[in-house]
Image: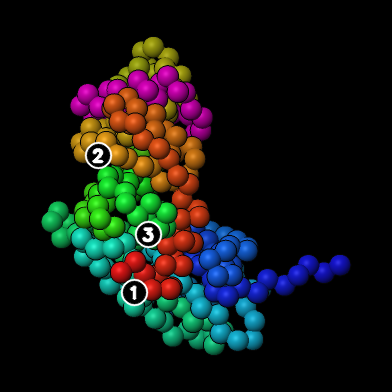
Amino acid sequence: MASARITPDWIAVDWGTSALRAFAMRGTAQIAEAASAEGMASLAPDGFEPALLRLVGPWLGPGTTPVIACGMVGARQGWAEAPYRPVPCPPVAAGETLRLRARDPRLAVEIVPGLCQHTPADVMRGEETQIAGFLAEEPGFAGTLILPGTHSKHVRVAGGLVTGFTTWMTGELFALLATQSVLRLTLAPAGTDPAAFRHGVRQGLDGGGLAGLFALRAEALLAGLDPVAARARLSGLLIGAELAAQPPAQDCVVIGAEALARAYLDALAQAGIAARAIGAGALVCRGLALARNGGMT
């Protein structure tokens, strides 16, 4: 028996640097999901529409399907550059998406703009939809949202507005140090050690994150430091240094993938901050639905 055809009302798209995720939506309900590795970094501007069609083509009917996209698809190197909205502001707003003219008449594509901060200079793309999805559920929240990843975001929220934010290159630094520095000779390619992670967090919180980096190599040479423990301690050093440089508000929520969110909760607990975690997946679709249906203004 043939499977039923998926017929979404619209399609939500989260397009990052290294990956593309699409969600078939019926109203505000997610009815199907698809993903590919065709992120922004692998595409020229004229490659975005074909990449999207390869992923969502089976969902398209003869008519026009709205597509609401966020993330690096709207970057300067993306499909088309969507202007930033300056903070303080709601995370998404009515009537401010960038509308594209797709070659395929079945697509009506709109890109959600990112947010920017002029002093100190900072930008985000994609996270604003997660923040909007979170505030739709908790409109009275006032505190710090931490969105960990390649570039970790500490976002200050009050009165339904993003009032400011700071980006930390924690994930990117970890990847560079683990694969392109002398530490590549010391670290295991995978695995974790909770005690070693907490050791690194404490050192990072106490201001010794930078000094602790080469010590991983030295301890491996002199005392046979276990490679898995070295990897976990490096992660702790960097996250601890991030949290020490800008302690979040006491009311703090971590939004992200389970394993990474759990690591941040552990580190925050060592810093004396009781936080909670929420998965990011459903928040993206909720935030994109708000962008499609009139935003939060």
Q: What element carries label 2?
A: loop
| Circle on res. 245 | none
Q: Does the magenta stretch include residue 207?
A: yes
Q: Which residue is tagged 3?
A: 132
Residue displayed at 42% across by 67% down: 290
Q: Distance between the residues labelled 1 and 2?
A: 29 Å
Residue displayed at 30% across by 31% down: 273
Q: Which residue is tagged 2?
A: 249
First of labels 3, 2 by sequence position: 3
Residue displayed at 42% across by 76% down: 110
Relative image position of residue 36 (x, y in whole percent):
56, 60
Q: Distance between the residues labelled 1 and 3?
A: 12 Å
Relative image position of residue 294 (x, y in whole percent):
38, 73
**Figure quadrant of residue 85:** bottom left
Query: Considering only vertical position in the picture, is 64 above or below 215?
Result: below
Q: What element carries label 1?
A: loop
Relative image position of residue 220 (x, y in whole percent):
39, 18
Q: What residue type is labelled 2?
A: Ala
Q: How far apart are marks 3 and 2 (CA)?
A: 19 Å
**Residue range of the region highlighted in magenta in the rendering:** 184-212
